[in-house]
Image (cartoon, rainbow, N blue to C red):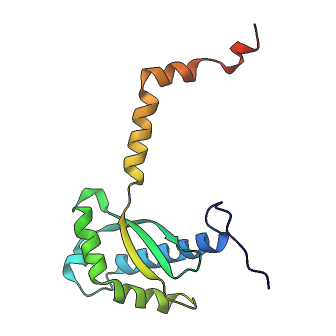
């Protein structure tokens, strides 16, 4: 069987599928409060995305406390403290050859959305968007 080489085109379908399964499983575990830590169970955490390494041995989990209820650093610290137990529970619910090592990072998606909205609201960008692209062809 030939080995597939990555040409820098982004994650494979398998990486995306496994990442989404881990995201759902981890969200369910946190939602049900299965980790025996009152601090962690009291903090509502959103798991925005999970990206997997090509060999599926490392999963980077992007998290954010819901509605800014707590600092994101505190949520990451609590999750990292229970990384082994979370990894074990994920491996119980999923059928993977290896339970991936979990790495927790802040989810900055909403910050990027705010920045994009701010850029689109800029008057010079609005002027460029309002200019029809066919003006050059009419001359």
Residue 9 lies, in percent from the top left, at 66, 60
The quadrant holding residue 8 is bottom right
Query: What residue sits 70% from the left and 72% below the top?
Result: 5
Query: What residue sits 39% from the left and 50% below the top?
Result: 110
Pick whichever, 90 or 42, lies toward us. 90
59 left or right of 45 in image? right
Pick whichever, 101 or 89, lies toward us. 101
Give the residue furthest to the right: 1
The quadrant holding residue 114 is top left
135 to 111, vertically: above or below: above
Residue 124 lies, in percent from the top left, at 46, 21
124 to 115, vertically: above or below: above
Give the residue furthest to the top: 139
98 left or right of 116 in image? right
Query: What residue sits 48% from the left and 90% below the top?
Result: 91
Query: What residue sits 42% from the left and 26% below the top?
Result: 122
98 left or right of 34 in image? right
Q: Quadrant of the C terminus?
A: top right
Residue 81 lies, in percent from the top left, at 26, 82
């Amino acid at each position: 069987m030939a080995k597939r080489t990555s040409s820098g085109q982004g994650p494979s379908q398998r990486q995306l599928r496994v990442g989404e399964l881990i995201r759902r499983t981890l969200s369910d575990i946190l939602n049900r409060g299965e980790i025996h830590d009152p601090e962690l169970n009291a903090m509502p955490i959103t798991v925005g995305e999970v990206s997997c390494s090509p060999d599926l041995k490392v999963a980077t989990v992007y998290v954010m406390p819901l509605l800014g209820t707590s600092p994101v650093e505190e949520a990451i610290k609590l999750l990292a403290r229970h990384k082994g137990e979370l990894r074990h529970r994920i491996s119980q619910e999923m059928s993977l050859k290896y339970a991936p090592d979990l790495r927790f990072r802040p989810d900055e998606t909403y910050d990027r959305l705010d920045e994009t909205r701010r850029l689109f609201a800029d008057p010079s960008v609005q002027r460029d968007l309002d200019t029809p692209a066919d003006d050059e062809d009419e001359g």
